[in-house]
Image (cartoon, rainbow, N blue to C red):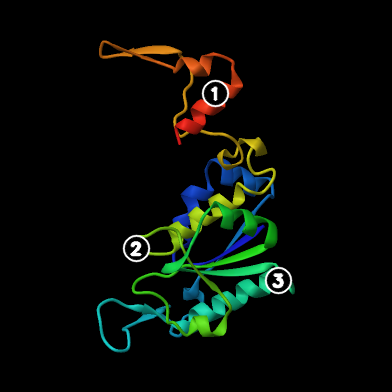
Amino acid sequence: MTFHIVTLFPGAFDSYLGESILKRALEDGKIKVKFYNPRDNALDKWQRVDQKPYGGGPGMVIQALPVIKAIEKALKACGKSKTSTKIVFFSPAGKQFDTAYAKTASKKYKNIIFVCGRYEGIDARVKKIFKMEDISVGPYVLTGGELPAMVMMDSISRQIEGVLGNFDSREEERVASPDVYTRPEVFEHKGKKYRVPKVLLSGNHAKIDEWRESRK
């Protein structure tokens, strides 16, 4: 799986991709991440890619042509197989991203292109040129598409065998509870003792699964 990210701020991904699971997945070659900055295709020497919106209003809009050229570069890097490539455009009004989407994407696509907007958004004519899907990661508005891209990369990557140390550790594939415990069995804080639920110490896996289901 290769993630192609069209963004004005590729540095925003450094910390997340440089730690833990995704870092190891990159080092092991389980996933790849490539960046395409619209500023590299700016229409002037100052690398400006934003202009005032037609019709008035606050904020600035990212120009279409720099983004179009960035997407074209990403598509060229994807190779000839169009059916294994998906272009995602982040929008609060888009389809809700969830685990089912992540599972399907991990099996169906070899390349996913994330188009990350900023400011008031990207000139809508971009969506007339490319077949892309509007996706939302939640019922809220963010300042850009970089965080949604990280969310989708994380969720999709963990569905790829070999990314997690133990593939069966995926919570969505087993009976899991939002409440988890580890050693010590009992600890004291400010004069009060806190214990692990007895059922988790019982060794009765049927009862443990029943308890975990009840916590959802």
Identified by mark 2, the residue type is Val
The percent coordinates of residue 30 (x first, y second) are 68, 49
Label 1: which secondary element: helix
Which mark is first along the chain, 1 or 3? 3
CA gap, disc 2 and disc 3:
30 Å
**Which residue occupies 66% across, 39% down?**
167
**Label 1 sits on what residue type?**
Ile
- Residue picked out by circle 2: 141
Q: Is residue 153 left or right of residue 138?
A: right
Of labels 2 and 1, the one closer to you: 1
Q: Secondary structure at mark 3?
A: loop
Can residue 41 be seen in the rendering of this structure? Answer: no
- The residue carrying pointer 2 sits among few (fewer than 14), some (14 to 19) or many (20 or more) residues within 10 Å by Cα, namely few
Q: Residue 160 versus residue 179: which sits nearer the camera? A: 179
Please name whichever residue, 49 or 208, is drawn nearer the observer in this view of the structure.
Answer: 208
Where residue 13 sits in the image (x, y, percent)?
48, 55
The image shows residue 136 at horizontal and vertical percentages of 45, 63
Looking at the image, which is closer to me, 156 or 214? 214
Q: Are marks 2 and 3 in contact (CB under 8 Å)?
A: no
Q: Which quarter of the image is occupied by the C terminus? A: top left
Q: Which residue is mark 1?
A: 208
* Residue under the image location 72 percent in, 71 percent down: 79
Hey, which residue is sitting farthest right in the picture?
Answer: 80
Q: Earlier in the sequence, mark 2 or mark 1?
A: 2
Q: Is residue 215 left or right of residue 189?
A: right
Viewer can see residue 205: yes
Q: Which label number is shown at residue 83?
A: 3
